[in-house]
Image (cartoon, rainbow, N blue to C red):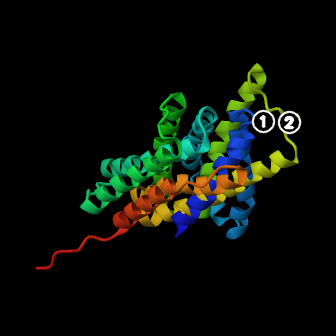
Amino acid sequence: MACVASMLVWAVGFPVADELLKVLPPIAIATLRLSMAALALLPFWYLSDAGREWRSAAWARALVIGATGSGVSALLLIYAQGRTDGITIAVIFAAMPIAGIALECLFDGRRLTWRLIAGIILSTIGGVAVYGARMGHLNMGLGALSALVSVVIFAWGARASVKALPDLSALGRTTITLTGGAIVAVVVQAFLDLTGSAAVPWHLIGAREWLYLAIYSVGSLAIAQLLFLKGVATLGVAVATMHHNVAPFYVMVFSLAFGAGWNWGQVAAAALVVFGVIVAQGRERRRTA
C-alpha cells in the first residue's frame, strides 16, 4: 500500500513538470524541487524524535548516497523530461524492476523465482504497452537514454539508503538523502549562474509556478519518496520498483486536468502491470518432507 500511494503521489509531478518546463530551465526546476523537498522535511525529522536520529546519523555516508541517488538521478530525470514528456519518462521507468532485481542478485544473493521473473515480464510489457496505447511508437533519443540512466541510479540509491542506513527511520533516510541531492543540485545551479549559461529566471516565477513547485517538490518528491522507501524496506527494491510500471496510467489520469484525453488501451495495459506486481509479490509454496 505504501508503494501504491507513493506512485499515485509521484505521478502527479509529471504533468506538473511539463507545465513548469514551459517557463523554467530543467536544472532550475530540479534544484528548486530538491531544495524545497529537503527544507520541508528537515524540521519534521528533527521534531519527530527531538533530534536523536539527527545527531546519530552517518551524515557523510548518507549525503553521498543522496547526492547520487537523489541529486544526479533528479537532474537526469528533469533533463530527460525536457526532451520528451511526462508519460514517456514514466514508461521508461518500466525498466526499474530489471535494475532492481539485478542489484539484488548482484549484492544480496537473491534467488530468481518463477513468480519474480513472470512479474517483471508482465509489468514491463504492461508499462511499454501503456505508452504504445497512447503514442503508437517509442522515441528512443538522448532524453530516453538519460531517463534510463536515471532509473538505474535511482534504484541503486533506494537500495543503498535502506541497506547502508539501517538505523534510520524512513523519514530520516528520505530527508538526509534528499538533502544530499539538494546540495549537488545547488552546486550545479550555482556554476550555471556564474557562467551565465542557465541562470534561474526568478522574474518568471509567479504564484502559479510556486504552487506547481510546491506540488512537485513536497508532494511528488518528499512524500512520494518517503512512502517508497517504506515499501523498499519491506518488499525489497526489486518488487517495490515494479509499482513504477503503473505510473504511466496514473500520469494519464492526472493529465486529464491539463487537457489530455482518456485511453482505454492504457487502462488495459495498466491492469497488466498490476497483475504482474501481484504475481511477483506472491509467496512460493514451500515443499514439505
Residue 86 screen position, x and y as percent: 60, 44
Residue at image point 69% right, 57% down:
219
N-term-proximal mark, 1 vs 2 = 1
Task: Give the residue pinned by disc 2.
Answer: 204
Q: Amino acid at mark 2?
A: Leu
> Residue 163's quadrant in the figure?
bottom left
| Residue 144 shows in this picture | yes
Task: Give the residue pinned by disc 1.
Answer: 23
Question: Which class describes the residues within 10 Å of circle 2: few (<14), some (14-19), or many (20+)?
Answer: few
Residue 248 screen position, x and y as percent: 54, 52
Residue 137 screen position, x and y as percent: 47, 37
> Residue 6's quadrant in the figure?
bottom right
Residue 59 screen position, x and y as percent: 60, 50
Q: Is residue 273 left or right of residue 87?
A: left
Q: Is residue 144 above or below residue 226?
A: above
- Secondary structure type for disc 2: helix
